[in-house]
């Protein structure tokens, strides 16, 4: 299958190491989730290629870190501009490998480019400090320095933005990066490698090692054990994040983790219901529910429960399911069969334990991994869809009575990534914002993602923050220099 790209050079299938595209005999198959068709056979990297990439990143480090920050910023600006220029091609690649509607892919590519612009602007503002010394004849200074060679492992649900959220601060601070993109979605990463070459990112500063699902643990083991790698940034499941954290312990790397969520979405009696419906549709059905910050437990207070359910159903009925490349489509397929099976099992579990199916509930007529947008009521604590991330287009409603009950239910999970609530009473807005144990809280909004605010979780949802002025901190060491004269 050939993709109709305006710039066919953006379609690459080889790993990118030391500024060159490197082939391999073994290939990994990339499929279009909407059709199941093979769209690419990419290089399979193993230990050798991963070490080679680390070496390239290590070799490139001294010159890159020595560049004035403004020069690094110029390169990042160029890369962002190239992403904007090629937004249609990048969106087509993204939809073809991931499945989301083209409009969402275009939005993601622009969101991705915005991290490069943001961190280009932050690069010249990474300040140090001087500390008044308690001893005369001394000066105490704190100087920011790049962490060094870094590794990033990124997920398939946002194949472009989750890369640049790491690449931006890495390059801005003077670090070099070895990226392992998700095996299902390497094409966006490789197109970014092409654009990085054109933007003037020097060889070795950004490297991409691709592979099949079976290669992930091998590549991960090298990235987490090689002493030259000083930091790992990972976005993905909590289970894999914990494993990588353990592996990084042997060489005590800095670790940033953006892991799974189990977001509550609370609608209080005093909510603006039409806004709450709008927010729920975004928080639940964006990317077919395949986001870490998706509303996973929709908690609705008694007084507005029935009205909310019928209004949400009316909006769900408007969703147009189909291949993301069709302009009218608003919800694409799920990425893969495993995810589909998990979503189906959550619905079955809920229904077998007393939940009521309002609409949807299983495979869509289109077949493959298309899942019907689904609404259930009577979802209770303890059902699978309350305790695990469903990662699919299933809205499960739980009824509650009091504010205290909602907060207790909302916080009763080891996850702590995003939470949402709708209320108009100012006192309640403040109380609930402060009581939710989550890294990000949407108060009267179902959308919290933005380049300029810190993205990250509490509890088992992760370590560190990405984006915003805080996102730079994880990529620098603050060295203290005591100077006597
Ligand atoms: C996610 O991590 O799944 C969401 C990413 C975003 O919205 O920035």
Image: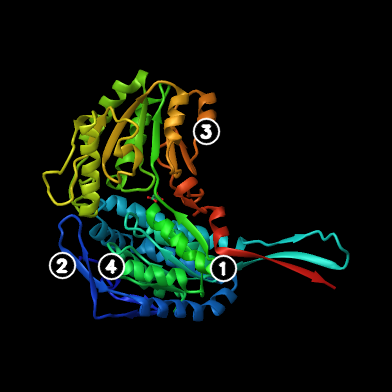
Mark 4 C-beta closer than 8 Å to ligand 1:
no
Relative horizontal placement of residue 119, taking residue 367 as reference (left or right): right
Secondary structure of the residue carrying tag 1 is loop
Disc 4 is placed on an element classified as helix
Residue 214: mark: 4
Would you name the residue on which mark 3 appears? 435
Q: Secondary structure at mark 2?
A: loop
Q: Earlier in the sequence, mark 1 or mark 4?
A: 1
CA distance for labels 2 and 1: 42 Å
Residue drawn at x 52%, y 60% is: 119
Contact between labelled residues 3 and 4, with CB atoms less than 8 Å apart: no
**Residue 21: image location, x then y, percent:** 33, 79
Q: Which residue is mark 1?
A: 147
Measured from the top left, where is residue 401 in percent x and y? 40, 20
**CA distance separating discs 1 and 4:** 30 Å
Query: Label 2, on which residue?
Result: 1
Return the disc, 2 or 1, that comes first in the chain's sequence. Answer: 2
Q: CA distance from mark 4 to mark 2?
A: 24 Å
């Amino acid at each position: 299958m050939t993709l109709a790209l305006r710039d066919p050079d953006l379609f690459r299938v080889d790993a990118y190491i030391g500024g060159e595209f490197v082939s391999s005999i073994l290939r990994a198959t990339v499929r279009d989730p909407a059709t199941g068709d093979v769209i690419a056979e990419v290089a399979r990297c193993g230990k050798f290629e991963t070490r080679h990439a680390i070496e390239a990143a290590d070799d490139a480090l001294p010159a890159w870190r020595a560049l004035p920050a403004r020069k690094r910023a110029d390169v990042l600006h160029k890369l962002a501009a190239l992403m904007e220029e090629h937004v249609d091609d990048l969106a087509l690649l993204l939809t073809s490998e991931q499945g989301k509607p083209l409009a969402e892919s275009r939005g993601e590519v622009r969101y991705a480019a915005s991290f490069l612009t943001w961190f280009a602007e932050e690069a010249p503002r990474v300040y140090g400090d001087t500390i008044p010394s308690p001893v005369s004849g001394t000066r105490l200074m704190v100087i920011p320095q790049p962490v060094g060679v870094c590794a990033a492992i990124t997920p398939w649900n946002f194949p472009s933005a989750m890369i640049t959220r790491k690449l931006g601060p890495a390059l801005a601070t003077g670090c070099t990066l070895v990226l392992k993109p998700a095996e299902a979605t390497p094409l966006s990463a490789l197109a970014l490698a092409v654009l990085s070459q054109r933007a003037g990112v020097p060889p070795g500063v950004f490297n991409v090692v691709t592979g099949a699902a079976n290669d992930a643990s091998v590549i991960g083991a090298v990235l987490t054990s090689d002493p030259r790698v000083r930091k790992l940034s990972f976005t993905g499941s909590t289970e894999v994040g914990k494993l990588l954290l353990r592996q990084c312990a042997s060489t005590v790397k800095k670790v940033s983790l953006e892991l799974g969520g189990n977001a509550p979405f609370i609608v209080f009696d005093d909510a603006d219901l039409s806004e709450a419906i709008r927010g729920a549709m975004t928080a639940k059905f964006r990317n077919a529910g395949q986001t870490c910050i998706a509303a996973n437990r929709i908690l609705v207070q008694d007084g507005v429960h029935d009205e909310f359910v019928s209004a949400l159903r009316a909006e769900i009925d408007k969703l147009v399911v189909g291949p993301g490349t069709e302009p009218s489509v608003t919800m694409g397929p799920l990425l893969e069969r495993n995810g589909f099976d998990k979503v189906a099992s959550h619905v079955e579990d809920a229904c077998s334990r007393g939940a009521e199916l309002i609409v949807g509930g299983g495979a869509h007529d289109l077949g493959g991994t298309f899942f019907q947008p689904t609404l259930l009521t009577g979802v209770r604590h303890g059902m699978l869809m309350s305790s695990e991330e469903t990662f699919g287009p299933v809205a499960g409603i739980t009824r509650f009575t009091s504010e205290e009950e909602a907060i207790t239910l909302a916080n009763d999970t080891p996850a702590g990534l995003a939470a949402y609530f709708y209320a108009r009473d100012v006192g309640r807005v403040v109380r609930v914002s402060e009581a939710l144990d989550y890294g990000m809280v949407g108060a009267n909004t179902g959308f919290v993602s933005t380049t300029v605010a810190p993205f990250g979780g509490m509890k088992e949802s992760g370590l560190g923050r990405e984006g915003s002025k805080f996102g730079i901190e994880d990529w620098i060491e603050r060295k203290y220099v005591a100077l006597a004269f």
